[in-house]
Image (spheres, rainbow, N blue to C red):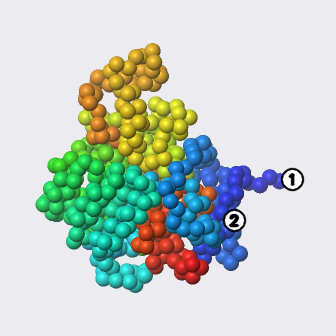
Amino acid sequence: MPNRNYLFYALTNSVCSKCLVKVEAKIIFQDDCVYLVKHCATHGREEVLIADDIEYYKKSLEFIKPGDMPMRFNTPIKYGCPYDCGLCPDHEQHSCLTLIEVTDKCNLSCPICYADSGVEEFSDNSHQPRKHRSLQHIESMIDAVVENEGEPQIVQLSGGEPTIHPEFFQILDIVKSKPIKHLMINTNGVRIANDKAFTQRLSQYMPGIEIYLQFDSFEAKALQELRGVDLRDIREKAIAQLNKYNISTTLVVTVKKGLNDGEIGKIIEYGLQQKCVRGVTFQPIQIAGRLSGFNSKTDRYTLTEVRRSILEQSPYFKPEDILPVPCHPDCLAMGYALKVNGKVIPLTGLVNPEAFVEMMPNSVLYEQNEELKSKIFELFSTSHSPASAATSLKQLLCCLPMVNVPAALNYSNIFRVMIVQFLDPFNFDVRSVKRSCIHIVHPDGRIIPFDTFNMFYREGSAGYDLVNNRN
């Protein structure tokens, strides 16, 4: 009897990309790739590439660890995932990072925008007027995160463009008054580049803040396609201002296959040369919001493809250095390194994988964990005995003097490369989304996974009526 031309690996649930109704889905291995195969009674069969590296995909499942629960749940289980978001008691992971959208307005109208923000008065999808949220409303959203997390690890101000909010610094004051460990500001950098007084005032909120700076490409063509305008001069000016005040910055690259995926190594190299940059995050395009000219079959770029591009284009990282993040290993991968005088010494691969899973907190920002930070820095102590070190660590220690390692290592010496792949109606996997740890605050205070928010809970999204008609 003939064999099937694929290996059936696992069964899960997904949604039909057209009607967003939950459907059964198979995970199969075929032609060295991993596919999600699903069938909708109305719209038929659908096959989606979810990884081009079978071994890494299987390995990611070895990095699963018990999730951390929030201090409270916000919604009951009624219809099942993904229709009960809020967080419901069936969600497996707390909020490692929580976004708060302080405005719907923006100073750009990017052809690609998950939030459908823009300079126009009305939203394209919901046809509602774009507006800034009030301080009272924003504080209530911040308080919702604190009530869920106690001491939230990371809160990210987003939008729209948060820096154009007329009460932006009052928002920062509110955040600073709360027990929040780390604040990120998600920005396109336009105001930072053009308003020196703004950036100088922003620097007064250090430490504990980080700029999450949109940085997609060095090429005008790619920037025009993704952002609708050539932002090269803006990026240069913004980085100059951030370097001037040494404001911790992560470069955030929205990656589209065939457009800017060839620049991954160049962007890492650029980040290493900037005083303010603490790392680079690569985010393959999520099919959500406004998405002009995107073909899901040809333009989709998976986490494993991004990882391979990092390994091929950057000389600093080996496969063992870029590993799944235990809190959500399907969708997050990270490599940590020591940055010294523009050079990189990878750290992640020095840790035994089993110890890595046990030691890593359920977090996407490891350096905020004091216990872990002390363990990492202990590895580089000049008093470390060769007899007590692993072979790879011995080799590393003998090379450290060549790069003039400072006596006191701190946050500015850490460099992280991260891959964040969000789920959308095509690659959606209920098994995976239950472990999502990057969440967003709904205007009514519910805490919702970023993936499902953009599919079902954002006004104007494709599944908004489906969820709201049920509730």
> Three-letter amino acid code at disc 1?
Met
At 53% from the left and 37% from the top, the residue drawn is 358
Q: From the top left corner, tell me how far across and down residue 159 is, in percent.
A: 34, 68
Q: Residues within 10 Å of mark 1 (few under 14, many from 20)?
A: few
At 34% from the left and 46% from the top, the residue drawn is 279
Location of mark 1 (residue): 1
Horizontally, is 130 left or right of 359 in the view? left
At 45% from the left and 45% from the top, the residue drawn is 334
Q: From the top left corner, tell me how far across and down residue 130 is, in percent.
A: 33, 79
In this rendering, the count of numbered labels is: 2
Q: CA distance from mark 1 to mark 2?
A: 27 Å
Instruction: Looking at this view, name the residue that lies furthest to the left.
Output: 197
Q: Between 183 and 118, which is closer to the camera in this rendering?
A: 183
At 69% from the left and 54% from the top, the residue drawn is 10
Q: Residues within 10 Å of mark 2 (few under 14, many from 20)?
A: some
Horizontally, is 401 left or right of 194 in the view? right
Q: Is residue 123 above or below residue 157?
A: below
Q: Can you tell which of label 1 and label 2 is closer to the viewer?
A: 2
Q: Is residue 453 above or below residue 339?
A: below
Q: Between 204 and 450, which is closer to the camera in this rendering?
A: 204
Helix, strand or loop status at disc 1: loop
Quarter of the figure with residue 129:
bottom left
Dot label at residue 27: none
Dot label at residue 24: 2
